[in-house]
Amino acid sequence: MIFPQVSIDMDSRLPPTKGDGRSSLAWVRVKVISRPGLLLRSPPVSLTTLGAGLPVGMLAGLPCGGAVCTAHAVVGFAIVGGWFVLMAWGGIARLVKREPNEWFWRLLAILQVLLGVQLVAGVTLLALGHRADAWLHYFYGIVFPVIVLVIAHVFARGLEDESDTWKVFAWAAFFIFGLTLRALTTGLGLP
């Protein structure tokens, strides 16, 4: 296997600053034969990101700073993880041919409330002047998941056998997991 030659050096330009004059990111220029001049971000470590218990590099690389932005990111990670758990729980219940217990429904309720909390945090960030890099962040993060939930609730309510409603929400969790994961990646500035 042939590996490309890579040259990494600190960029001589000053890194961009936040409104308070502090550096927001350290810039590193990476030169790869196939992609010369590729610019990568290397986020700084702060105590607020360490206390959140989430990947420090992910939270430190947020496009905005402050408590609301960190809370929005933490809730975003919780939402994606929660929908994954709900999806996996439904899949396992299907494999073992047993209905999930009442904690499945409690988790579903918590995740729906967290989507509302996330909406409030996102609107607060918009009001403070912080905008996502892509409009898709808003659609993946709240519009499409709400549409999926409304469809799931309408469909589950119309089922003849009430014991099958968990299957509808397990499938909804599958789609919402993918949508919210994509919202998280667009919010973090990942491709």
Image (cartoon, rainbow, N blue to C red):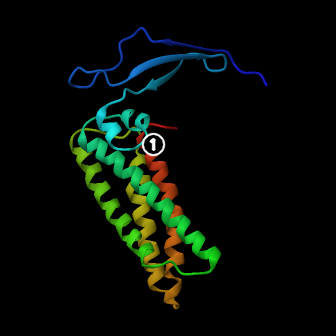
- Which quadrant would the N terminus be assigned to in this image? top right
**Residue 24, above or below 29:** below
The residue positioned 39% from the left and 58% from the top of the image is 143
**Residue 50, above or below 136:** above
Outermost residue, bottom side: 160
Q: Is residue 37 left or right of residue 142?
A: right
Outermost residue, right side: 1
**Residue 57, above or below 11:** below
- Residue 20: image quadrant is top left
Residue 19 image offset from top left, x and y in percent: 22, 25
Outermost residue, top side: 12
Q: Which residue is mark 1?
A: 186
- Mark 1 is surrounded, within 10 Å at the Cα level, by few (under 14), some (14 to 19) or many (20 or more) other residues, namely many
Residue 39 image offset from top left, x and y in percent: 50, 21
SS at mark 1 in the image: helix
Residue 122 image offset from top left, x and y in percent: 29, 49
Q: Which residue is nearer to you in this view: 86 or 136?
A: 86
- Residue 94: image quadrant is bottom right
Q: Is residue 118 left or right of residue 95?
A: left
Q: Which residue is nearer to you in this view: 170 or 49?
A: 49
Amino acid type indicated by mark 1: Thr
**Residue 160, above or below 152:** below
The residue positioned 32% from the left and 54% from the top of the image is 118
